[in-house]
Amino acid sequence: MITHCSLRAFALLRYKISVSQREFVRLRRARLRRRYRVTYGIVQMPMPSPTSYTISATVCTVAVRPTRTYGYSSPILGPVLRLRRGDRVQMIVHNAVHFPTTVHWHGLLVPGHSDGGPQQGINPGETWRPVLAVDQPAATLWYHPHPHHDTARQIYLGLAGLVIVDDGDDHGLPSVLVDPMAMDPSVAVQRRQFVLNNGICEQRTRMSEHPDMPALIGINGKVHDPKRIDVETRLGTTEIWEILSVGMPHPFHIHGAMFRILSLDGKPPPEHLAGLKDVVLVEDKAELLVSFTRPATREHPFMYHCHILEHEDAGMMGQYTCA
Ligand SMILES: [Cu+2]
C-alpha cells in the first residue's frame, strides 16, 4: 500500500540513490531475503505482493526548478494563429533567441519562399516578413522551427504553436463527417519511390533485400544535402508517391502539397485517413496521390521528410522544386 507520497520524499529517495547506490541495493536485497516490510521514506512495500492496492488522488505542492524554455512571444509555445481562407496575412517573425531558427507553417499551402524551410534561416536579431496568402479548406495546422540539425531541440524546448484555418464553410457539424471525394489515380503524370532508412540496424534486417543500400539515415540511400534538389515536379500536376519504411514506421510529411492516401500496406486507407493529408504514418508501404499546387524554386524548395524530429535532423529529408 502506498502510505505516503510527496515530491520531497521523491527527491529524498533520488538523493539517497545518487549518494548511496550500494546502500540502497543492499537494503533492497535484504528486503527480498528476509521478506519483511521496508520503508524507504516513500513506499511501504508489503511482501508478498498484495491482491489489492489503494491509491489516493492527492494535492501536492511542486517547487519546480527554474527551467530554460523557448516560446513565441510567450514563455513556452506560442499563440494560436487563426487564419481565414482568402486572407493575406503579413507575418512578422522576429528572432529574439541567440541561435538561427526558421518558422515553417506546417500544412499551410504557400509558395516555397514563404514556407519557412531549412534554407530560410533567420539569424539572431533578424526579422522575416513573409505574406501568407491563405487559400485552402478549413484545417488544423501548426507552426514550428525547421533549421537543419536543430529542429528537435528547438521544438522540444517550446517553439511550436497552432494554426487554425477557417474557410467560412465550417459552421456547425455537417450531417456526414466523412465524405471524401473519389480519387482518380489515372491523372498522375509520374510515379516515384522513396525508401526511408534510419540506419544500421534497419539495414541489417533488409540487407538481403537491398544489398546495395548504404548504412545511413536518409531517403533512397541519401542523407539530406541542402545543395541537392532531389525531385523536380511540375505545378498543377499530380503524382503517385510510393513510400517505403525500412525497419520501423516513419511519419512522412510533404511541404507545400496536400495528398490523398491511395493505399496503406496494400489496402485502402481507413475512413479517418481518407481525406486530405500532409503527414502519413508509413508502417511498411504507402501510396500517395500528391497534388502540386504551389510553386517552389531551387533557391526556396519544398521539403519532404520523416517527421520524427531526430530523424529529419539526422538527414531523413529531401527537397523538391515545383515549377
Ligand atoms: Cu523516421
Image (cartoon, grey):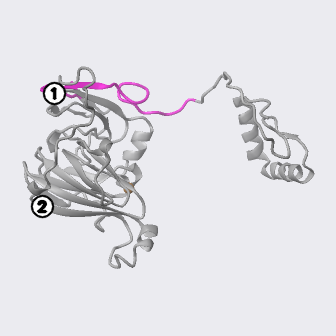
Mark 2 lies on a secondary structure that is strand
- Nearer to us in this view, 118 or 168: 168
Image position of 86 (left or right of 47)? left
Q: Amino acid at mark 2?
A: Gln
**Numbered range of the magenta stretch:** 66-92
Res 189 quadrant in image = bottom left
Label annotation for residue 190: 2
Image position of 84 (left or right of 125)? left
* Residue where numbered disc 1 is placed: 85
In the image, is residue 79 part of the stretch drawn in magenta?
Answer: yes
Q: In this rendering, does residue 264 appear at all?
A: yes
Res 37 quadrant in image = top right
Q: Position of residue 154 (x, y in %)?
A: 40, 41
In the image, is residue 43 part of the stretch drawn in magenta?
Answer: no
Q: Residue at x 36, y 76 (%)?
A: 209
Label annotation for residue 246: none
